[in-house]
Amino acid sequence: MANLFEGLWKKAVAFYDSMRGRYRVAVVDELPDRLASKTVYAVGEDGQYWLAALTCPCGCGDTIQLSMMQGQRPRWTLVERHMRFPTLAPSVDRTVGCKSHFFVRGGRIQWCQ
């Protein structure tokens, strides 16, 4: 019986660790003045989003705004996985400031080389 509880405890801790630090989606009508960390904001109305925004994950503090408007280039898509974990496509490749280049996949940042 003790082994069963120990196994369940280890699984619960592993699940918590996998969730910690992952980005979540917040759906808003307007972009807030201050963005929360670990949050991708989907800005729009009635399920039609025209902007995704997040604070740069490198730590520079810059706000990154990504167009999701049909017919515009470049254009990003935002997919919410279970439990509101976002995936953004294509990658985010900053050409100014910190020059970060990364993917957001399943709520996790994957840095490009």
Image: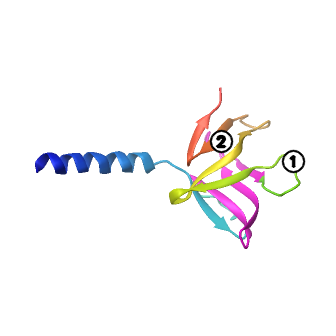
Magenta residues, start to end: 37-66
Q: Amino acid at mark 2?
A: Cys
**Element class at badge 2:** loop
Q: Residue at x 59, y 37 (%)?
A: 110
Q: Amino acid at mark 1?
A: Arg
The answer to which quarter of the image holds residue 36 is: bottom right
Tell me if residue 64 is in the magenta stretch.
yes
**Magenta stretch prevailing secondary structure:** strand
Q: Residue at x 60, y 56 (%)?
A: 80
72 left or right, relative to 102: right
Tell me if residue 53 is in the magenta stretch.
yes
Q: What residue did someone put label 1 on?
A: 73
**Element class at badge 1:** loop
Query: Could you say where residue 16 lies in the image, as x and y percent from the top left?
Result: 38, 50
Callout 1 environment at 10 Å: few (<14), some (14 to 19), or many (20+)?
A: few
Q: Residue at x 67, y 48 (%)?
A: 88
Residue 60, disc: 2
Whether 74 is drawn above or below 34: the answer is above
- Quarter of the image for the C terminus: give it: top right
Question: Label 1 near label 2: C-beta < 8 Å?
Answer: no
